[in-house]
Amino acid sequence: MSYLHEPGERRFSLSLDISEIFKPIIVDRIIFSLINQKMIREEHFDQELEMCYLNEKGRVIFQREFEEKLGTIIKHPRLNRSVSYRRLIRLECYKLIKHLLDEEQYESLKMWW
């Protein structure tokens, strides 16, 4: 079950849908930060067959920053308490569950910070 990505045998399309909500908030910001701070450079990429991939060293750098970002705490206005980005993703999943169970209408996450 999904609403943006087509379901497939080897893909979890709903998780891909949820990731779309958080890509600009988490992943894009990490990428720009790594580039602007020159933490990721050309030597962290491998090129093969007209494609470009992060090499092992680059993946370690990205993964470390990603985990740090997921631990970042923000104040949630509706809950009136501090939550991590990791918890925010889980809360978004709970909203989808409530929507699928017809308990409340789903409203997508809107950045407030």
Image: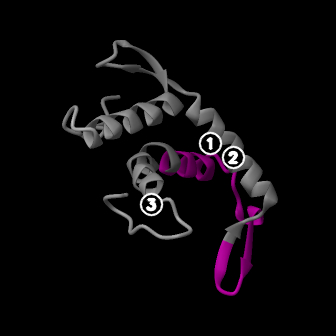
Does 24 sit above or below residue 88?
below
- The reply, left or right, for residue 87 in relation to residue 76 is right
Q: Are marks 1 and 2 in contact (CB under 8 Å)?
A: yes
> Which quarter of the image is occupied by the C terminus?
top left
As for residue 69 lying within the magenta part, the answer is: no
Q: Find disc 2 in the rendering and name its residue.
A: 63
Percent position of residue 29, x then y: 50, 46
Q: Closer to the N terminus: mark 1 or mark 3? A: 3
Q: Find disc 1 in the rendering and name its residue.
A: 66
Does 10 sit above or below residue 85?
below
Badge 1: how crowded within 10 Å, few (<14), some, or many (20+)?
some
- Type of the residue with mark 3: Ser
Q: Could you say whether the residue bearing mark 1 is in a helix, strand or loop?
A: helix
- Type of the residue with mark 2: Gln
- Type of the residue with mark 1: Phe
Residue under the point 69% across and 87% down: 49
Q: Which residues are magenta?
A: 28-52
As for residue 29 lying within the magenta part, the answer is: yes
Q: Which mark is residue 13?
A: 3
